[in-house]
Image (cartoon, grey):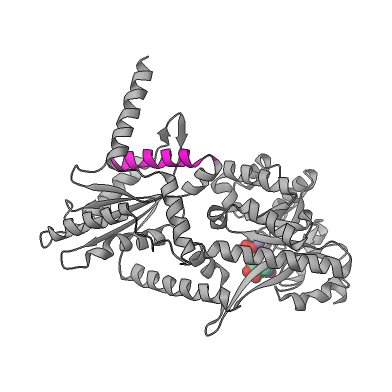
Amino acid sequence: MESFLALAVAALIAVVIVQQVKLRRPEEFTRERRRAQSTNSTTETVVVSPAKRALDAEVTERHRDLPSKFLLGAVVVEIDHLRLVRDAFSDAIGHELLGAVATLVQSQLRDTDHLDLLSDREIVVVTNELPTETDLQRLADRIVNALSAPIEFGSRSQLVTCSIGIAHITNKDDATELIGNAQAAKNVASASSGFSRELFDQTVKAEAMQSLELEHQLAQAIENDEISVHYQPAVATESKQVDRFECLIRWFHEHRGPIRPDEFLEVASRSDLIVKLGRFVLGEACYQAAAWTYEFQKPITVSVNVNHNQLLGEDFVATVSETLNRTGLPAPQLELEFSEKLVLDDIDYSQQMFAHLANTGVRIAIDNFGATAASIGVLRKLSAINTLKLDRRFIENVHTSEIERNLVASIASFASQLGIDVVAEGVETEQHAEVLAEMGIPYLQGFLLQRPAPAEDVVGLLDGSIAAS
Ligand code: G
Ligand code: MN
């Protein structure tokens, strides 16, 4: 009874505080996102909701009343992977978690501070009671501390990490920049994992400008056919035959030449561009594999890398099914690669996603396997995996280091017992290839065999074998 009372009181407090911070329903954000997308914009910021206007008014008022030499500060707290929680459980549970985090953040504030929601995964604090930058940093410290223990909400308990952006202005600065600056700093922080924080400064400003420019150019690049797909074979070690390719996105910029995929994918991930790019690669890959299968009368498999932001931005499983239908590629000839890091970040979510995908009949690969120490544990939990792609850092020293060799050999034997294919990535030298062949690794992929290249440059491999080419 006592604990029931305690719970009831806690719930009541939560409700009161949540109401106090005007927690909006998740549908509202979804609607805003959709509206933003339907205006063909590449960012989500074109829609100014009533709540955003209220926040702007709050900032303007505080800025107007700000004594000189004092700072008006903003701290943006983004809960990492909150959309994964929403997708894996429900919007309502995601929203409850956001409410619980808001409550904990609120507990670190003074009465005069203002807390609001910025989006369906971001909380913002506006404060003018903290006169120095150090005070703002201390506030960020307290927020991190408050959020470091598992967050209790309803009957659940969830560990979270957050990315925090801090910005401040004086009464001489432009008030309209405060929140945007804190968000830009948060974007820089969210590039590192775990709790991370960043203060808005000139470097962050320059970075934000650059990535905005790149985002703009990327949107045009899709229209201008500057984006293409390159193919790199995973070669059967014994027979040297080729019947599977990894598909890799490439951007050849009109003036800058090739742009590194990790650079532009990071930028694309901030908007629905990532979904557009993902669909483009998936579509190209499936068309190509279907065409080659028909031309060479043998099943050709393509593997496509999946970025975690792609999963968040759309109904990914539906896109996969739709693409297979449209292109006529049999599902088992499409393999989707998920990086080990993505899987480890949220294993329960990955389990569910893989189960849905496995139902469509596609294959699932773990990319960059071995990049972290926790790899083997992952395999125990995930039954839907068809392929492991050994990270190139693993392969690098395989010919000189006995430890690496033993590790690779034991992973390979473990995988083969589970009926999982193994592809060694980053095979760059004859020595690598020899050692891996001796160990019985079934597939080799890397610069030694074939660099990623346009379809017309690799099609010749399908006629014979790598050895003959
Ligand atoms: O993370 P993932 O394995 O999907 O990365 C693929 C990237 O690795 C591509 O950009 C591709 O160009 C690159 N790549 C392919 N083969 C090799 C190789 O043998 N060595 C190195 N260093 N990179 C490679
Ligand atoms: Mn890959």
Residue 248 picture location, percent across and down? 66, 68
The residue drawn where x is 63% and y is 47% is 375
Asked whether 185 or 413 is in front, the reply is 185
Residue 124 is left or right of residue 419, and the answer is left
Q: Residue furthest bottom?
A: 255
Q: Is residue 406 visible?
A: yes
Q: Is residue 337 left or right of residue 97?
A: right
Looking at the figure, which quarter contains the C terminus?
bottom right
Q: Is residue 103 left or right of residue 369?
A: left
Q: Is residue 213 left or right of residue 297?
A: left
The magenta-colored residue range is 89-106
Image point 64% across, 44% down: which residue? 378
> Which residue in the rendered view is the most extreme toward the left?
67
The picture quadrant where one finds residue 395 is: bottom right
* Residue 441 found in image quarter: bottom right
Quadrant for the N terminus, please: top left
Q: Nearer the viewer, residue 370 or 164?
A: 164
Where does the image place residue 278, in percent across and percent down from the top left? 61, 63
Q: Is residue 368 visible?
A: no
* Residue 123 in the image, given as x and y percentages of width and height: 34, 49
Residue 74 x/y as whole percent: 27, 55
Which secondary structure type mostly characterizes the magenta part of the structure?
helix
Between residue 314 and residue 76, name the one nearer to us: 314
Q: Is residue 8 above or below residue 313?
A: above
- Dividing the image into four quarters, tell me where ligand 2 lies: bottom right
> How many numbered discs, if any?
0
Residue shown at the point (42%, 61%) measured from the top left = 44
- Farthest residue toward the top? 1
Q: Residue at x 54, y 48 (%)?
A: 345
Q: Is residue 93 magenta?
A: yes
- Tell whether position 280 is magenta: no
